Image (cartoon, helix red, strand yellow):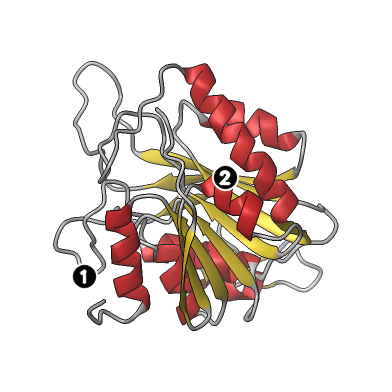
Amino acid sequence: MEIPALSPRKYQFGTATLYRGDVAAVLEKRISPGSVDLIIADPPYNLGKRFAGFRDRWPDEASYMAWCRAWLDLCVDRLAPHGSMYLMASTQGMPALDLHLRERMHVLSRIVWHYDSSGVQAKRRFGSLYEPILLCVKDKRRYTFNADAIRVETKTGARRGLIDHRKPVPAPYSASKVPGNVWYYPRVRYRMPEYREHPTQKPEALIERMILASSNPGDTVLDLFAGTFTASVVSRRLGRRSIGVELQDEYVTLGRLRLRGGEAL
């Protein structure tokens, strides 16, 4: 697959910036090194899905991985010293991307996004019910992680009311905890309130957890391969600045509408 050579076009909506253009070109020409606090990257998975203007199928795995490595290296350079990055990928592609990034960053967590059912029911293998997400930080001793912002209920403490007798003074188990690395969020379905016409839209709740955990109000979140611009929309709702980058004109129009609050362009 060839990426069109387009000059990046910029749109501004308050604290949200939107670029129509190739991710690598925007990273190289429009984003300053060390200027981004958090990157959320949701690239094409090279699985043959049909998007607005192209089908995400590279000639072979080697060319796809070379393309990924090029823009990932630019991401590492654009992150602030305390910065973090969440990378989403296919189960097939993530192992190679993991190996590449662990030479450049510290892999803090390997997350499984578990959802309700696969799109196509398998008959001769086990169907896919998850996607991997990699959380990497630039400096393993200095990074943002807001544990209290993402705490969830614990069944042991909040529901069962058990006592922890391992402590010097026995006490009830905590009623909340930081989530583990298996996250359950239903996939976005047709006619759901947040649904937009896009083949790989991610749930707002999934993206919200990433932003709450790994950034602070006023930070800059880079939304790469923005698609429906969910990370940009959630960033604004949570008081973060955002930079969304998307190549396909149809999705750029969608992003402009969402960031303008649904007003006509």
Q: Is residue 37 left or right of residue 188?
A: right
| Residue topped by disc 1 | 193
> Residue placed at 54% from the left, 70% from the top?
242
**Classed neighbour count for the residue bearing mark 2: other residues with Cα under 10 Å, few (<14), some (14–19), many (≥20):** many
Residue 154 in view here: no
Q: Is residue 96 left or right of residue 251?
A: right
**Numbered marks: total:** 2
Q: Which mark is residue 24?
A: 2
First in residue order: circle 2 vs circle 1: 2
> Residue placed at 22% from the left, 25% from the top?
122
Quarter of the image for residue 84 reads: bottom right
Relative to residue 25, is residue 145 depicted above or below?
Answer: below
- The quarter of the rendered structure image containing the C terminus is bottom left
Q: Position of residue 17 (x, y in %)?
A: 50, 71
Quarter of the image for residue 13 reads: bottom left
**Classed neighbour count for the residue bearing mark 1: other residues with Cα under 10 Å, few (<14), some (14–19), many (≥20):** few
Which three-letter amino acid code belongs to the residue tagged 1?
Pro
Q: Position of residue 195 (x, y in %)?
A: 23, 62
Assign a secondary structure to mark 1. Answer: loop
> Residue placed at 63% from the left, 54% from the top?
29
> Residue placed at 34% from the left, 70% from the top?
256
